Image: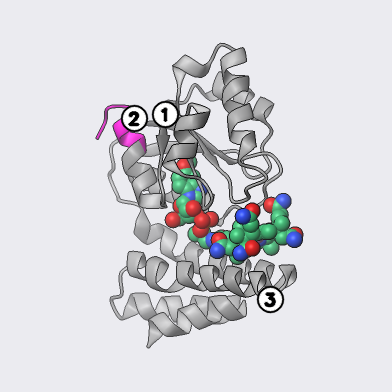
Amino acid sequence: MSIEAIYQAVLDGDAEAAQDSVRAALDAGVSPAEILNRACIPAMTEVGRLFEAGEKFVPEMLISARAMKAAVALLKPHLGQADVKSVGKAVLGTVAGDLHDIGKNLVAMMLEGTGFEVVDLGTDVPPQRFVEAVREHKPDIVGMSALLTTTMPAMKTTIEALTEAGLRERVKVLVGGAPVTQEFADRIGADGYAPDASSAARRAKELIGAA
Ligand code: B1M
């Protein structure tokens, strides 16, 4: 079954097999959302579990991440909607100290798919870089992703930097990432939280009154 083949290829870090099986699944009519939610994301969750159990190590996490990115690259054209009306602009990044970008990239894709213009600042983005990007691009949304408990505080620092720069009221701040919760988002003064990429796009639209 192609879903299982994709899961196994991402788990094994075999980018070529991941792409071959994604192509086969798409040809067989499997939806991109199913490929993401039933194969790619569960495979990365299993990689994390094996890492925690001491059965996989950082280089293996990295090659699985590469295989996932290769798979997602084939899904991207299918996730966006053609002729979507522009709803606003979002500046997005993974916060300072954090190099995880798969979730953030999925959020970027879903935002683009619902009509946002996305300025992706990449990973390890210092608070000041978010501030400069808000000045330069005048977005409606600032989206921050964090995958490490140790980098979550950088979300708060970034919100404080926006406040100090007098820009906080001009944007809505949306946060997410595996360790982030609604309670944490409320505590640091973010405007919104989303647990996954599709709800991030929905929440972003709600925040700017475009839902
Ligand atoms: Co790292 N890593 N990692 N890692 N890694 C985790 C996060 C970890 C949970 C693994 C584990 O121990 N089980 C653990 C964190 C523990 C903690 O803090 N609680 C961990 C660790 C410890 C580390 C290092 C410290 C390891 C080391 O060096 N000893 C190191 C840190 C490096 C750094 O960032 N400074 C490290 C490094 C790496 C790699 C570079 C090897 C690689 C990342 C490659 C890359 O991203 N380009 C990696 C990977 C792949 C993982 C796991 C296995 C998978 C992450 C992933 O891509 N998931 C991860 C284990 C896990 O998550 N189970 C792990 C799939 C992705 C689709 O999900 O990113 O959660 P996620 O995104 C979701 C939602 O969270 C949400 O939507 C997405 C899609 O639905 N979301 C948002 C994300 N951002 C959002 C923003 C929003 C809204 C929703 O609004 C703006």
Name which of mark 3 and mark 1 comes first in the sequence.
Answer: 3
Taking the spot 59% from the left edge, 51% from the top edge, the residue there is 147
Q: Quadrant of residue 170?
A: top left
Amino acid type at mark 2 = Leu
**SS class, disc 3:** loop
Residue projecting furthest to the left: 211
Q: Report the magenta residues as a range.
A: 204-211
- The answer to whether residue 207 is magenta is yes
Residue placed under numbered mark 1 in the picture = 191
Taking the spot 52% from the left edge, 77% from the top edge, the residue there is 18
Query: Callout 1: few (<14), some (14-19), or many (20+) C-alpha neighbours within 10 Å?
Result: some
Picture disc at residue 207? 2
Tell me how the rendering is colored: one colour
Amino acid type at mark 1 = Asp
**x%, y% of residue 181?**
46, 44
Name which of mark 2 and mark 3 comes first in the sequence.
Answer: 3
Amino acid type at mark 3 = Lys
Taking the spot 52% from the left edge, 82% from the top edge, the residue there is 8
Taking the spot 56% from the left edge, 11% from the top edge, the residue there is 166
Q: Which residue occupies the foreground of this view, 207 or 112?
A: 207
Per the model, the C-alpha gap separating discs 2 and 3 is 39 Å
Residue placed under numbered mark 3 in the picture = 56
The answer to whether 128 is drawn above or below residue 114 in the figure is above
Name which of mark 1 and mark 2 comes first in the sequence.
Answer: 1
Residue projecting furthest to the bottom: 1
Per the model, the C-alpha gap separating discs 3 and 1 is 37 Å
Q: Do residues under tags 1 and 2 come within 8 Å of each other at their CB atoms?
A: yes
Ligand 1's quadrant is bottom right
Quadrant where the C terminus is found in the figure: top left
The answer to whether 77 is drawn above or below residue 104 in the figure is below
55 left or right, relative to 87: right
